[in-house]
Amino acid sequence: MARRLVLVGFVAATVAFLAIQFSNGVGRLTWDAVPSAGQLAAAAALLLAGQLLIGEALVALSAPVTGSNAVRRGFHVTQPSKYIPVGVAQGAGLTVVLRRAGMSTSAAITAWGLHTSSVVLSGVGLGLMVGGLDAWPIPLVALGAAVLCGYNRPLITTVLRQVPRLVRAAPSLETAVPDQARLCRCLAATGTGLILHGAAFALVINGSTTSVATAIAAYLTAHSLATATPLPGGLGAREALLLAFLASDDLTGVVLVRLLLMGIEAILALASIRRRI
């Protein structure tokens, strides 16, 4: 009974905060700056494809431990909960889901941490590289490549060796790190998914003075840096960073992509609950 009450509370909080954030976003739109229905549909398709790939990145990390479908559904079911304040609800929910799917606690926590890290590192690394090839300083390309190289097993396990001393966690955290091939598949899926999200953003702001490459680079970097904050879903941080990178004060494109992504996450969560994906 207690577990069921916690689950009901978790779902209710997710729906409530998602609705609040969606309503706030709609209120910030400048309607005469909204692009055509065709552009919005194309952007939604890119965001959907990107979100599915980001989910597959978690499957790449976890599939050998448990069923791919269970991991996939767990990711999409818990995604909307990232809008709950403090920013830990999604991770906690995903850990519970993965444990029920057959993973150990150490493996579930490690998979969540590695997946989140892949979002941050691939977004920052690719963002710097794409931006460096367009209008940002060229040395940023090398820095972006170096960031991507940080997602390697020896470095990750070195960091995790320090965790038991800090939180008295089980040493099995280190052994739960997948091999380098699966880490690379995770990073590739996450990076491709984020590029598709960035392309959706570039499409939505089409007609501005910003080039496609700069728009994608700005989105990748802002999205990933915001993910590293405790803000719910990176709200506020992503928007502020995007406007700073683009030297703009037009929130319409930024808010539209956020709203479209919220809707897609909610649809994927419902479909996953019903086991349709």
Image (cartoon, grey):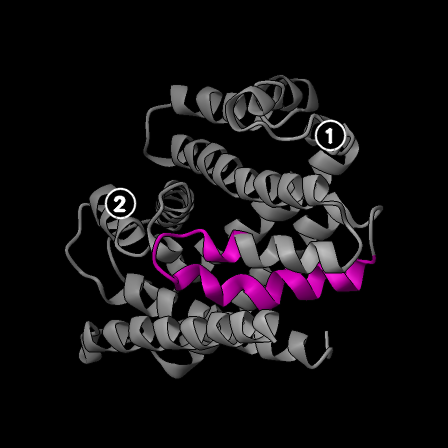
Is residue 114 shown above or below 66?
above
Residue 87 highlighted magenta (yes or no): yes
Magenta stretch, main secondary structure, is helix
Dot 1 lies on which element?
Answer: helix
Q: In 3D space, how far apart are the residues under numbered discs 1 and 2 (Cα atoms)?
A: 37 Å
**Kind of residue sitting beneath label 2:** Leu
Left or right of residue 61: residue 266 = left
Quarter of the image containing the C terminus? Answer: bottom right
Q: Is residue 268 visible?
A: no
> Which is nearer the eye, 167 or 199?
167
Left or right of residue 177: residue 149 = left
Residue 29 position in % (x across, y down): 21, 74
Q: Is residue 55 visible?
A: yes
Label number found at residue 172: 1
Q: Which residue is mark 2?
A: 241
Quarter of the image containing the N terminus? Answer: bottom right
Residue at point 40%, 24% (across, down): 140
Residue at point 66%, 63% (across, down): 74
Magenta stretch: give its range: 67-91
